[in-house]
Each structure stands twice: as structure tokens, then as C-alpha cells.
Amino acid sequence: MNETNKPNLSDLKIDSQARSNDGGGRRLMLIAAAILVTIAVIAIFIVGGTSVTTVEVAIARVAPTGGTATVLNASGYVEPRRKATVSSKITGKVIEVLVDEGMVVEEGQILAQLDDSDARRRYEAIRAERDVARAAIEELEVNLADSERTLRRINELRDQGVASVQDLDSATAAVDALRAKLRVSRSSLDAAEAQLAVSAQDLENYTVRAPFAGIAVSKDAQPGEMVSPVSAGGGFTRTGISTIVDMESLEIEVDVNESHIAKVTPGQPADAVLDAYPEWHIPATVRTVIPTADRQKATVKVRLTFDELDPRILPDMGVKVAFRETVQDEATANSAQSLVPQPSVRTENGQTVVFVVEDETVDRRAVSVGRSIGNDIEIIAGVTPGDRVVVSESNGLTDGQKVKVKS
């Protein structure tokens, strides 16, 4: 090989111009990478550091525009004021039951007949004694009349000097004795009449009658069973024949929490809804507030009457009652724009506000409030019916914040 063609190690070096151009490219790459990292960190902070709050909402309703508004809700049952489990006054065996469930009965109608054979025999015996006393009086009256005639004749003969004094005394004594016997017999007749009346009443006690007009809701005894006005301590003696309910006396009985009883007054209007007919609103009126509280339940009983009874209203039906109050200022009542739950209204910095959800974003609105109606409150301005208002805890919510509505 020729020496002129051998490689020279001193020739292996980088040109200074090429070195300068390559260093500038590396700096641009480092700057671009730093920018990308910064953007990624900011994106992670924004996406990962911001959480979406889940809120519970309620729909604003139309405010009542009538003359009354609900101030309290309660539940109870339909109860009759007149209800009686009819029994006999004495213990006896049932011979016949003349009533059945659902039967309409009139006052005094016979419901059942007990075995009265023994009582009837006693009655017949006392009546016979009465008849004997009456017959004895008739005999004594005849004898007394005869003795009085004899006394008059002896008096005439005594005046003529024919009869003796002894004859006159004997005739007078006979008249007096008969008069005394007649008085005793008449007293005996009165006693017999009184005993006969008692026996007749005892006999009547074996017939069970309805104490008032109503409907029989139960049949509690069958022929052949024993009934008694008091429990005999065994399982074979009934204490009633039938239960009668006066359907004209049906009313509502509800338990009101004692902390809210001040909202209820006699004569107050109310709206009743039977559980069996949830779409049927029945006008009612508070009849009385029972003046005592149940210390176990911390409630007070309130009784209401139906403004108009209906055959569909039955005893022991469940009922929900909305107590109403008369609106004094109708202009204020009619000016209410909507009705929202009370928890949705908050006070921030002395201002009453409501958070309304629009397109998954909360809108903080200042509102004017009206009356509290039960668990709701009237909104005079700021919320319209149909708006979704936040009712869950809203501490930390800000205007325009993204939220998720709880399903």
C-alpha cells in the first residue's frame, strides 16, 4: 500500500461550524419538551384537582292561590263516635241471632233471643199470685159491702129499741175488720204488681235489642253459645252479640306532635285523603283537640268531622289530613311565585339565596321569601315553578359550579 493513501488520525475532527449548528437543535428540543411537560402538569391539575359535587334537587311548585294553605300534615284513622258491642244484661244461652255483618239496624230492633224459659215460668208464677191477690180483694169488697148493710140495719133496729148494744158492736167490728183486710189485700196486690213488673223486666232482658240505629259490623255469637255481660274467665262464654256502628257519627282521629299542636284550633278547615282513595279530597273541620297529651308518644289527639259523609267512608280506614289556615292577606298569598322546600333556602352574607341547577351548573339566585307552609316556603321572586332547586347541603357551592344531580 502506498503511504500517501494511509488514513491520518489527525484528520478525524469535527468542523467547528457543524458543531455550532448541532448544539442549537438540542436546545430547541429541550425547550419543547419542557413546554409539553408544563402543559401536561397543568392539565393533570385541572382535571384531577377539580371534583364534581353531587347535589339533591327538588322541583319548585306552583304556590297555592286559594284562600287556604296547608300548615300541618298528620295521619290517623276514621273512627265512629258511637260504637257499641251489644251484649245481654244477664248470662244466658243464645237461642236465635237475628243480625248479620253489614245489616242495617234500627233503634230497638231485636238482635238476638236468649233462652228465657226459666224467667218466663217465674213471670207466670208471679202473675198468678197477682191474680189471686186481685181476686181476694174482690171477695173482701163483697163481704165488706154486706157487712156495711148489716151494720146499717142494726143501727135502725137499735134506734127502734129492738137490737142490743152487743149486736151493734159486733156489726161494727165486722165492718172494721173487713176494711182492714181489704187494705192489706190491696197492699199485697200492689206488691204483686211490682214483683210482676220486675219479672217482666227480667224476661225482657233475655231479648237483646239495638241501642241505636246503625250498621252491624260484626257477629260475635252463634245459637247455642253462652253470653254474659262480663267475662266468665273461660273460652266458651261470649261477651257480646254484635258490634253496631252509627255511620252518621264517623269522624277522623289523628295524633299531632305536641310541638305542632299550637297550629291546630277547633273549627279549623282541613283536607282529608283516605288511603283507599288517594285522589279523593274530602273537606273536614276540626271538632275538638283532646285536652291531654300522650307522654309515651308526645302527641295530642285531634278529632275532625267530615263536612259531608259518603258511603265510601268506612270505620278504621287510614286517612291523611292536611290542616289548613285561612289566609288573611290574599294579596300577599296571590303574589307568591312558587313553593320550594325550606332546606333549599339559605342565608349568605345577610342575603336569602337559592341555588338553581341549570344544565348541570348551579345558578346562585337572590330570592324574596313569603310564608312558611308546613315544610315548604313561598318564594315571592327569584324562582319560577319548574326550576330545580338544590335541597342538599350546599356549603361550598359557588355560582357557575359544575354539579351532578343525585338520581
Image (cartoon, rainbow, N blue to C red):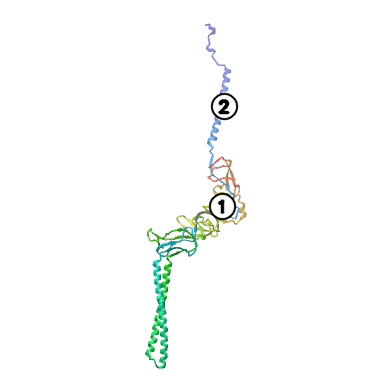
The image quarter containing residue 55 is top right
Question: Mark 1: which amino acid?
Answer: Ser
Toward the top, the furthest residue is 2
Q: Residue at x 42, y 73 (%)?
A: 194
Mark carried by residue 32: 2
The image quarter containing residue 129 is bottom left
317 is higher (above) or lower (below) than 20: below
Q: Give how far across and how far down residue 293 sits, in percent.
A: 47, 58
Q: Give how far across and how far down residue 218 sits, in percent.
A: 46, 58
Callout 1: SS: strand
Mark carried by residue 91: none
Question: From the viewer's perspective, is 161 left or right of 16?
Answer: left
The image quarter containing residue 91 is bottom left
Spatial CA distance of label 2 from label 1 is: 63 Å
66 is higher (above) or lower (below) than 175: above
Residue placed under numbered mark 1 in the picture: 372
Answer few, some or many: residues within 10 Å of disc 1's Cα (few below 14, many 20 plus, some between 14 and 19).
Answer: some
**Viewer-side residue, 58 vs 105:** 105
